Amino acid sequence: MNNPGRIHPRWTSLLTWLSTHGMDTSPDGVLVEPRMIPGVGYGLFALKSIKPATSLFTIPASALINVVTLSPHYPRATRHLTAFQLISLHLFLHRPAGIQESLDPLFGPYISVLPREFDFHPLTWLCTKNENDGPLLLTSLPPSTMDSLSKLFDRFHTDWRAVQTYLRDNLSVLPRSADREATTASSEQEKLLDYLWAWLNVNTRCIYHRLKESPSDPSNVTLCPILDFGNHTTRSIRMVPDVADSHLWTSPRHKPKGAFTLLSPSMNTTRPDEELYLTYGAHANRTLFVEYGFVNEISNELLSLGEVSGEIDLQTSVEALFEARGELGTWMKETLKDEGYWGDWTAHFAPSPAHPSYRLITALRLFHLFPISMARVPPMPDDVLKPWKDTLLGQRERVSDENEKEWKTTLLRICEDEATRATRAMAKFSEHSFELHAQAIWFPQMRRSVEMLWEEEFCVASAMAESVRKNEDF
Ligand SMILES: C[S@@+](CC[C@H](N)C(=O)[O-])C[C@H]1O[C@@H](n2cnc3c(N)ncnc32)[C@H](O)[C@@H]1O
């Protein structure tokens, strides 16, 4: 990303606050600073030349926002709230008003550097309906993206209900500052939007941090100052947390327990003023868009070069196939659920050749286990299911040659339909006049993101169809 701009206006107060927690904020202790990048927000930039695998900064445990630092201030929270809900509750209670500082006595200077609004985020579009330009883009999303967004919406509401219940039962015993701020929002919708702000900050900025003995404990997440200015890259040159931190449970170290160190890229020297990135995970664009509000640029060329991985979700089309088969379709759905293969049916551009996921192959093999004209469950279902179940157990490679041919033909048809739908949607989208609504600063970027989502649908569906036509082995 080019054109790094101004430093975050509250950077100095953040460092001053971090030093009160015992952090080394000298020029040798902090090798990066957050600078504005148009269309992206802030990013982390190197202040000098940095050797590979060098500590960029170490955040003391007491300056992290997580279950360990929050639980003492929230009675009974660990019994009633997940870590995610607790952290978002704390931000909700201490959302800064307008451009003012957060009044939180614990983490105020950190909360004050968080993004002040998420108007660009598709979850905000869904929660605010007609209040901004987003809903116009919502109606243009690929169905699989809309599906993922609805799931995110459900997660958000589940957390909001848990937080409301906790507040209702515990408000009288919460710290005074929380009590005062929690009641300032006047309407239910305002409160919901305050919580949405908090929730999106947690969802877009929390990272894994080993706090509990079990590595998979859901409480192992934290908000971490400075690190959370790191933007996402798909490339391998990226910052990484010091893994030694996650072994604290097994190997006591000299560093204070629970502190968080971020290291510079392990194989490269970073130049002064270069942006340093994180990798949020090997996510499909659909996921990046829904969870974080941005996407990776996609084109056939970038996909072919392996710079990005292309993925499409074929759940909607495949689900419709099962639905159309009446009683038998319902039974096949239950069978797939019992075996853990219902849903999450994707196709991938890479590694070449473009291919369906094993889950998708498994579902389509079952779909074609019975003649397409059949709508009733057979009298001896277990016997008929045996060849299919044998493929799951690795006892046979395929149900039959005929079955292979049939599911591939169905996959070809689905992918051709997807590619046609994407072409039509892209044409309609490019003709759509958004001028009247395009005043928001984030609009061009998010419009481009929607285009990229359709582009990915088209490229992956076309490549997948081509693989079937060429009779590639999957
Ligand atoms: C952990 S924050 C990174 C810092 C953030 N840019 C800021 O201004 O504070 C994650 C958010 O940054 C933005 N972001 C991260 N990586 C990006 C990228 N490669 N392209 C565009 N936006 C990105 C998205 O808005 C995402 O939700």
Image: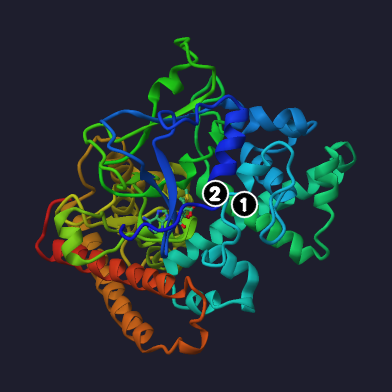
Front one among 384 and 54: 54
Q: Is residue 260 above or below residue 292?
A: above
Image quadrant of residue 105?
Answer: top right
Q: Which is more toward the observer, 9 or 266?
A: 9
**Corner quadrant of residue 140:** bottom left
| Label ID, residue 114 | none
Location of the N terminus by quadrant is bottom left
Residue farthest right in this picture: 172
The answer to whether mark 2 and mark 1 are in CB contact below 8 A is yes
- Whereabouts is ligand 1, in terms of quadrant? bottom left
Write the residue at 32% across / 67% down.
Answer: 372
Instruction: Say which residue label 1 marks.
Output: 199
Is 158 or 388 nearer to us in this picture? Answer: 158
Instruction: Look at 22% across and 39% down and name the residue there.
Output: 396
Amino acid at dot 1: Trp
Q: Position of residue 33 (x, y in %)?
A: 43, 44
Where is residue 332? Give x, y as percent. 43, 55
Label ID, residue 203: 2
Inspect the image, locate mark 2, and give the three-letter code of the amino acid beneath it. Answer: Asn
Local crowd at mark 1 within 10 Å, few (<14), some, or many (≥20)?
many
Question: Residue 313: x percent and y percent?
Answer: 36, 60
Q: Is residue 340 left or right of residue 358?
A: right
Residue at 68% of width from left, 47% of height from top? Answer: 91
Left or right, 378 with respect to 222, comes to left
